[in-house]
Image: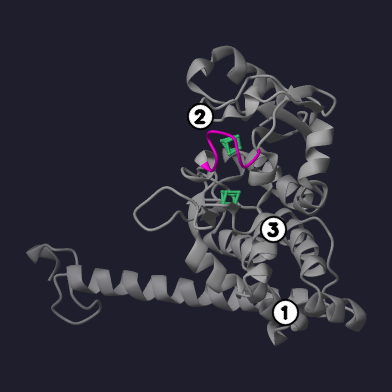
């Protein structure tokens, strides 16, 4: 969303119905809020969830739970589309048959030290904004004063920056920035460039959310036949999730937006062109064979003496 779109939205939308206050706030804005165990609405926010996860959220949670990224995604998330072109996103999957977070416990959050970005920010929303013609995002905030949340009545004032520090969001923002920029960039591309091929969305999903599968992809023979990755860089990618995550953002910029980041192996481009050419020739041959078959079915085998090749007895 760019600033103009946001302002139009703020002017036109019936915001009485929306919990998001249509004000862009900066980090110095002082808010009144406190959440604690004795508040009357304890756990109300976790009982009815709609939480989008960032790649770093998933990394923290799957490591805490000692699951592979694939198992974490299956058990704790549902996929959704972030735009009309099917840009893949993932949200928390609530408990079976309910709306509560699977990690909600009577005493509070069961994964508190590794809770996702959105849970840390609540009741503030982080809005990634971009100025037109710019692809770097700028963090601004909005309040989400939901009626059930009584924390807004608590007598404590602090700035948004102080609240962010208290909630430990800095590392989450830092390691989510590259991904948010990718999302903004794809949304900004608009319908003009057409719907991206399915393989783009598959790559986006794998590099963003399924980091263990992405690691296997990066260490595969096919990947290393294509890209020239120095040994020490490859060792760091295989050993460290965060390094791999940030590599993934740059890999996506390289493959989806043509931003030069990776060095290709000598001959990799030519080999890719050969493969594409062979594929195009195969498709062309299949198309021609299908056309020949259709014509044969319609008019009979061509060139045989006595064929009614123009469909008229006069042509015999
Ligand atoms: S992860 Fe924790 S804070 Fe976030 S919705 Fe679940 S229980 Fe609540
Ligand atoms: S609804 Fe608000 S005050 Fe109540 S537990 Fe959730 S964040 Fe805290």
Q: Secondary structure at mark 3?
A: helix
What secondary structure is the magenta-colored segment mainly? loop
Please identify, in this view, whether the residue under mark 3 or under mark 1 is nearer the observer.
3
**Which residue is denoted by mark 3 in the rendering?**
114
Residue 208 place in picture, x, y as percent: 66, 60
The residue at 83%/29% (across/down) is: 27
Q: Is residue 300 visible?
A: yes
- Disc 2 versus disc 3: distance between alpha carbons? 24 Å
In the image shown, does 277 or 195 lie closer to the viewer? 195
**Location of residue 124 by image quarter:** top right
The extreme left residue here reads: 313
**Which residue is denoted by mark 1 in the rendering?**
223
Which quadrant of the frame does ligand 2 lie within?
A: top right
Q: Secondary structure at mark 1?
A: helix
Label 3: how many residues lie within 10 Å, few (<14), some (14-19) or many (20+)?
some
Please identify, in this view, whether the residue under mark 2 or under mark 3 is nearer the observer.
2
**Which residue is denoted by mark 2 in the rendering?**
148
Which badge, 1 or 2, comes first in the chain's sequence? Answer: 2
Residue 188 place in picture, x, y as percent: 67, 38
40 falls in the magenta region: yes
Q: Is residue 251 above or below residue 141?
A: below
- Disc 3 versus disc 1: distance between alpha carbons? 32 Å
Mark 2 within 8 Å of ligand 2, using the beta carbon: yes
Instruction: Say whether marks 2 and 3 touch (CB < 8 Å).
Output: no
Highlighted range, magenta: 36-43
């Amino acid at each position: 969303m760019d600033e103009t779109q946001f302002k139009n939205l703020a002017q036109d939308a019936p915001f009485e119905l929306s919990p998001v206050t249509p004000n862009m706030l900066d980090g110095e804005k002082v808010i009144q809020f406190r959440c604690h165990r004795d508040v009357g609405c304890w756990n109300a926010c976790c009982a009815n969830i709609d939480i989008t996860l960032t790649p770093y959220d998933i990394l923290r949670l799957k490591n805490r739970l000692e699951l592979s990224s694939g198992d974490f995604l299956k058990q704790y998330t549902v996929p959704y589309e972030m735009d009309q072109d099917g840009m893949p996103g993932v949200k928390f999957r609530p408990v079976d048959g309910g709306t509560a977070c699977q990690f909600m416990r009577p005493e509070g959050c069961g994964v508190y030290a590794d809770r996702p970005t959105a849970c840390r920010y609540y009741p503030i929303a982080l809005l990634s904004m971009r100025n037109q013609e710019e692809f770097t995002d700028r963090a601004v905030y909005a309040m989400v004063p939901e009626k059930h949340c009584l924390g807004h009545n608590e007598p404590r004032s602090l700035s948004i920056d102080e609240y962010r520090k208290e909630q430990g969001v800095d590392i989450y923002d830092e390691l989510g920035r590259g991904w948010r920029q990718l999302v903004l960039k794809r949304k900004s591309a608009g319908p003009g460039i057409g719907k991206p091929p399915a393989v783009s969305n598959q790559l986006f999903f794998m590099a963003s959310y399924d980091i263990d599968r992405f690691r296997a992809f990066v260490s595969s023979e096919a990947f290393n036949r294509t890209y020239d990755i120095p040994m020490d860089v490859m060792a760091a990618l295989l050993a460290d999730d965060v390094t791999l995550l940030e590599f993934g953002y740059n890999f996506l910029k390289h493959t989806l937006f043509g931003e030069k980041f990776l060095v290709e192996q000598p001959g990799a481009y030519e080999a890719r062109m050969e493969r594409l050419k062979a594929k195009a020739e195969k498709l062309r041959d299949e198309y021609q064979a299908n056309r020949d078959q259709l014509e044969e079915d319609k008019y009979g085998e061509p060139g045989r003496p006595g064929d009614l090749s123009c469909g008229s007895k006069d042509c015999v």
